Image (cartoon, rainbow, N blue to C red):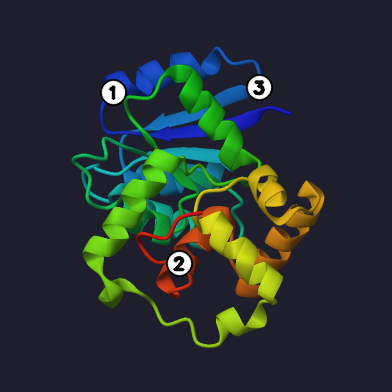
Amino acid sequence: MTIRVLIADDQAMVREAFSVLLGAQPDLAVVAAVEDGAAAVARTAELRPDVVVMDIRMPGLDGIEATRRITADPTSSAKVLVLTTFNLDEYVYEALRAGASGFLLKEASGLELADGIRVVARGDALLSPALTKRLITEFARTGPAARRPTGAAVDRLTSRETEVLVQVAQGLSNAEIATALTVAEETVKTHVGRILHKLALRDRTQAAVFAYESGLVTPGTTA
């Protein structure tokens, strides 16, 4: 199945380079390349891509607000993959809270970008251990004041589901969680699906953010 991709970046050279690199992949098709967040929102509504590759810093409507609007659209199933220079961007955490399915450094290779698109297209989180560590650092910097109230949401989970959620937040894959818990990978997949349903979350990335915001996982916790 071909994955339809929309690129949003204010730099024409970046848009053109990504379009060429991704267009060379047999399972990817670039349906549009736009220069700002407003155009990303409009073209996503029109073209219904599977994945939006979103820059954070753009004139007018930035990538965070564009991500929020795209993921809030109940008629859209598009996943958002945020691109960042990270050492300069201070808003990656907010992008994830806005509904992004993951983020990737702009220095990544074309193959890494293509693989990242495939990861988020199938509903997985793109949170490598190195980037997860930076996410935790940002969470620690913003502190408890940045957390949203979760009410009794955590109480809806079973003890095993809570355990799985914690490991998802620590960046473990289904296979790694299965090994740690000595269960089948399909069982872990079932637990993750139930967690997302009970907490009304879109994907694993939002589950990881929820785990930090609810206090289930704190900076410094290790898998």
Q: Dot 3, crowdedness within 10 Å: few (<14), some or many (≥20)?
A: few
Q: Which residue is painted at 41% across and 52% down in the image?
A: 67
Is 160 drawn above or below residue 89 in the view shown?
Answer: below
Give the numbered dot on residue 217.
2
Secondary structure under tag 1 reads helix
Drawn side of residue 108 relative to residue 140, left or right: right
Residue under numbered circle 3: 27
Q: Amino acid at mark 1?
A: Ala
Residue under numbered circle 1: 12
Secondary structure under tag 3 reads loop
Drawn side of residue 112 relative to residue 36, left or right: right
Q: Which residue is painted at 54% across and 44% down in the image?
A: 46
Instruction: Tell me where residue 220 appears, x and y as whole percent.
Output: 36, 59
Is 67 drawn above or below residue 199 in the view shown?
Answer: above
Which comes before the other along the chain, label 3 or label 2? 3
Q: Which residue is painted at 80% across and 50% down in the image?
A: 186
Which comes before the other along the chain, label 1 or label 2? 1
Instruction: Tell me where residue 210 appears, x and y as whole percent.
Output: 48, 68
User: Mark 3 touching mark 2, by CB under 8 A?
Assistant: no
Q: CA distance from mark 1 to mark 3?
A: 24 Å
